[in-house]
Image: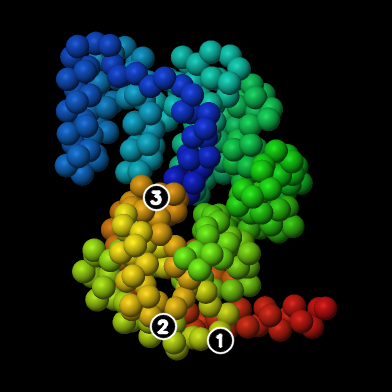
Amino acid sequence: MRYAVAVVLTFCMAAPLLSQEKAEGPANEKAQKTYQEAIKYLNARMTDSAVDSFKKADKQDGGRCVACQRKMIKYGMEVGDWKTAETAAEEMVTEAQAGEEAAIAHYQFGVVLMNEALSKKKDDVYTRAHSELSQALAAAPNFPAALLLDGRALAHLGQDDAAKAQFQGFVKLAHADDPNRQRALRFIDEPELARARMAPAFAVTTLGGQRIALDDLKGKVVLLDFWATWCEPCREALPHMREIAKKFQGEPLVIVSVSLDSDEQKWKDYVEKNEMTWLNYRDGGFTGSISKLFAVEAIPHTFTIDPDGILQDEHIGDASVEGKLKKLIARARELQVAQQRAQ
């Protein structure tokens, strides 16, 4: 299982604050050329080469190229080049002024270290992440994303009481309809979940007008299916998805198909014509909010999520998932029986 999901989730949380900063390209003429070279590498999907060029452009610009540093962080994390991502984050911390700017810089460094820790499973890196996030909160105490991420870092360090305090702080600041608020409430009750590979929290309104949040589906298995009407492999896989829906009808399984179609009417017509009777949502493309959360870059792409909300399986292309679903559904049934007995 990739760690891209965690990266996208935590980084996107800071978007409202980050968007307030002015991103500038390099000032140095040589650096500008190298920066454009890096962009070309990105367009050609040569991410490793792009990271090297962004790093070179930043160096040519005297370590002051904010646009270079952000891309070094984003794509360095994507390819697992933690040294490059850390270097850029450190530069941004050094250049940041006091207050919100410093908070954002320390938070970004915390994001890098948290995802590095998830990848390497090293307590010392979680400790460093907690240190950066603490500095972010010292500069901006009411920074919801930093509170939530710091809670996760503390949970991984086994400091559950301290983690709960951070989650409680986040809950007080978050909007009532923020899906991460519901997730934080679960972390408060079950801190062990903050150490698990949880699927990103999200909430959508389906084609039928039903508002669903992933954490509302606690106790049920969720099969998340990313597809599009223009995708031939997706169309070929549809009978299989229809078969799964029929086979497990009445079981504690929820199928959510997330379309990447831009044409709403074409999507609606296709869903009706092809009797896609399960939950459907249109995300609009690879840059859609849910697609970005799950780092979807190719379709069809499915994610299997267990009754606790933990990611269990991920497949690109049509895949045989029935065996896994049977096991998870059996566990979901056991949990339902246990809950009924406890009442």
Disc 3 on helix, strand or loop? Answer: loop
Image x and y of residue 318, in percent: 29, 74
Name the amino acid, label 3. Gly
Q: Residue at x 50, y 68 (%)?
A: 208
Camera-near label (2 vs 3) is 3
Residue located beneath label 3 in the image? 288
Q: Are marks 3 and 1 in contact (CB under 8 Å)?
A: no
Disc 2 on helix, strand or loop? Answer: helix
The correct choice, above or below, for 91 with respect to 333 in the image is above
Q: Residue at x 51, y 86 (%)?
A: 249
The correct choice, above or below, for 147 with respect to 196 in the image is above
Taking depth in this image into account, of 244 and 57 the one nearest to the observer is: 244
Image x and y of residue 258, in percent: 41, 63
Q: Residue at x 36, y 47 (%)?
A: 287
Pointer 3 or 1: first along the chain? 1
Residue located beneath label 2 in the image? 244
Image x and y of residue 64, in percent: 36, 14
Q: Is residue 315 left or right of residue 150?
A: left
Residue located beneath label 1 in the image? 250
The correct choice, above or below, for 249 with respect to 172 in the image is below
Pointer 2 or 1: first along the chain? 2
Taking depth in this image into account, of 238 and 96 the one nearest to the observer is: 238
Q: Is residue 83 visible?
A: no
Q: CA distance from mark 2 to mark 3?
A: 26 Å
Disc 1 on helix, strand or loop? Answer: loop
Mark 3, other Cα within 10 Å: few <14 / some 14–19 / many ≥20: some
Q: Is residue 201 visible?
A: yes
